[in-house]
Amino acid sequence: MNMDAMDQAAVKEMAGRAAVEALVRSGMKLGLGTGSTAVFAVRHIGDLLARGKLSGIRAVPTSFQTAIECEKWDIPLFTLNSREIGGTLDLTIDGADEVDPQNRLVKGGGGALLLEKIVAYASASYAIVVDESKLVKALGVKFPVPVEVIPGARIPVTLALEKLGAQVTLREAVRKAGPVITDHGNLLLDIRFAIPPDPRALEAELNRIPGVVENGFFTGPHDRSLLPRIFVGRADNPV
Ligand code: 5RP
């Protein structure tokens, strides 16, 4: 790992730990996000449990990656459907690919957007952990926004997205020939816009295209405010 990568990991760790210290309490039902920043929150929770500083945590992971990390740390795992969870969570901590000045997000760089959104909507409160490179003025221009699509709808959905002005790329797997298959057996179409879109309107519009399962704009439920509290790790500053 070069020095920059080490610094970036330290900054991500700072953000992940800060969110846990500020918000996680014994007995909570937690949604645990995915990615290289959220993993530091998971590890800190695991460490606090191992040292007896935290107890009674019930966790719902948002991906295989996070479930495996939780197993390593003996964090008790459930699904949203488990009787111990009952479909609602106290708090979710997750990462993000972009955060705008209104705390709206683009997520899904790790391909886990579907469960990440379901878990976020089931949570009473929501925290996002990022390094400062994720802060942007407008969503959907710099980082591509993933659209999760059932495999049989790949081409019609691509055409519909192009009609909306998006540049569309099927996400390719690494060390496996062909496309990424999500944890739910779907494909990901990564879309990018030359002109900043209206994220709230587009989030709803994308999900109206038949074959689209979910998209990576997270602008919050329309019936209540679920905009997250953002914990930003900065190289030169405490969170
Ligand atoms: C996964 C996500 C991640 O939270 C997002 O991609 C950020 O990941 P990282 O912290 O590794 O940059 O949405 O689907």
Image (cartoon, rainbow, N blue to C red):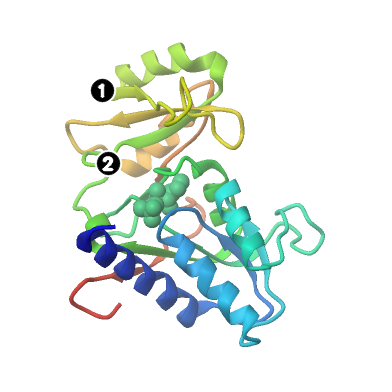
In percent of the image, x 36 and y 44: which residue is there?
200
Mark 2 is on which residue type?
Answer: Phe
- Residue identifier under label 1: 165
Q: Residue 235 vs residue 79: left or right?
A: left
Q: Which residue is mark 2?
A: 143
**Total marks drawn?**
2
Instruction: Determine whether, in the image, residue 113 is placed left or right of residue 171.
Output: right
Instruction: Judge the density around disc 1: few (<14), some (14-19), many (≥20) Cα neighbours within 10 Å.
Output: some
Compared with residue 198, is residue 236 higher up or lower down, i.e. above or below?
below
Q: Residues within 10 Å of mark 2 (few under 14, many from 20)?
A: some
> Residue 220's mark?
none
Q: Quadrant of residue 26?
A: bottom right
Where in the figure is residue 169, as x and y percent of width and height?
33, 23
Quarter containing the C terminus: bottom left
Give the mark toward the camera: 2 or 1.
2
Q: Residue at x 21, y 41 (%)?
A: 142
For numbered disc 2, what is the local secondary structure? Answer: loop
In the picture shown, does residue 55 fall above or below 69?
Answer: below
